[in-house]
Amino acid sequence: MYIRNAWYVIAWDDEITRELMQRTVLGDPVVLYRKQDGTAVALADECAHRAFPLSAGRVLGDDVQCGYHGFTYDGSGVCTRVPAQERIPPTARVRSYPLVESHRWLWIWMGDPELAADTPVPDTHWMTDPAWDRVTHTRLFQCRSSLLHDNLLDLTHEAFLHTASIGDEAVYENGITVEVDGATVSVDRFMPNCHPSPLFEKATGEQLVDRWHTTEFQLPALHTIHAGVVAPGGRREDGYLLEVLNGITPATEDSTWYFYAFCRNFAVGDASVNELLAKSLGDVLTEDDVALALQEERLKDRPDTRQDVLIAQDAGVAKARRLMAKMLAAEQAQQGRSTAAQPEKVTAGR
Amino acid sequence: MRADAHRPAADEDGVPVCEVASSPDTPGRPERWRWHIRLREESPDGRAEVPSRQVVHLGLGPDTSLEVAVDPASVRAEVELVDLTDTYLVGRDERGLVVLVQGSGRCLVEGRHELGRHDTLVLEGDDPMSVGLVPTGTGPTTVAVVRLHPVEDNVLGWVP
């Protein structure tokens, strides 16, 4: 079950070219390409004729041609040519998905397209702001998306899974403040007067700091971790600041795309810091990838009657689960109403 | 929790309510039900009380009442409506849990959380043992203070 009426990251802007690319999102295969003017297109990756994947075809001008019998579709999914006959069946069309390109990410809307226009994509401007530098990664995790949400909302795992880089005991020794507003859950942890994490010490040279991280989860697809360090007693805005963007997009029920950007307002343009962060944070993601795949294996066999034991540090996790359930229920109720409102099918007598 | 994050639900009679917080708080959890706090649009007068629950109703404005229901075997509830005119200190005991639900007006809690109508703040565990409430609006300001105490050796929590 997926929340469909939401923007999800599907790709980096430079991944989409004049070549066809296939990516599965929310269980549905999607084919992506760019038209001649550079506009990105997302279509259901299945020819209406015989369900052949369009991604195995070719781009012709602004259209995509199926590689099996040559059915050709424009960027809106309408069939423009059936090579074997003049007439184009009106049902020969494939679904097209709304896309928004913003600050290096392509966002896709897999739900009711009419709702997409009223919903802005989240702000990720740190990825293109020249005052910031960044390193990025893309992974396909072998686990359900909820495990990544739990991971990002309960950062105490850093002290045990990422000991060589971003974790230490300061994380679990300090409590959290959770705020829930609309479809956003924020988990704030302030760690006063402590050592920076090993990686932060390497990157900044600081020894004793006030430290913080706030995971802001804009349900259901983006966690922005606002983090940083500052001299003890200093103001957060004066510190070394990080904006860590985590685009979480379910591929299937047990695999998840993870689009990651670690943005910083210091050592901008420093290639050695970029190299250090790219390597270390890649290792962090690998540690998460391995751990969550192990967790997924166990969960597959766990009976529904046995559930996680949650503790106080899981307050953000619990509130996010509650909100996810609320959003899913609202979407299903909406779908139910739409189905009920369909006109009855009338069968003409002969 | 902002008012727009509360969960639409239905009570035992199928009447729509707005669930502010409960234990367990996440649908589908296996833990035994302990307590809930809900907002109701209509007056609850005449409603059949559910056996084995202690239910307290409190007017929270002209059209809203606050319902606090607990399992009396494990939780004891105290509810009061505070007319906020000046700084008001709310304390809690170590094993207890305090839920603040804003009625009319606005107030600032702990100098950093501003609550508007039906916004809610839950204090438990490592949270401060007492917080100051300061009215920030010009009109009347009311806040419902719900104190939940564990009975005997029971442990109270908001998670899950």
Image (tube, coloured by chain):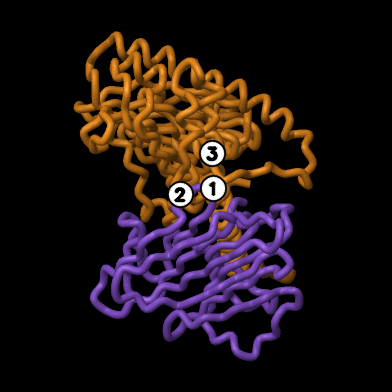
CB atoms of marks 1 and 2 within 8 Å: yes
- B24 or B5: which is nearer to us? B24
Could you classify mark 3 by the number of other residues whose Cα lies within 10 Å: few (under 14), some (14-19), or many (20 or more)? many
Q: Colour of chain B?
A: purple
Amino acid type, residue under disc 2 in the picture: Val
- Residue A70: where, in percent of width, then height? 54, 28
> Considering the image in quadrants, where does the N terminus of chain B appear?
bottom left
Tell me the quarter of the picture where residue B2 sits: bottom left
- Is A104 situated above or below B132? above
Answer with left or right where residue B6 lies relative to residue A344: left
Q: Earlier in the sequence, mark 1 or mark 2?
A: 2
Q: Chain of mark 2?
A: A
Q: Colour of chain A?
A: orange
Say which residue label 1 marks: A315
Say which residue label 2 marks: A178
Amino acid type, residue under disc 1 in the picture: Ala
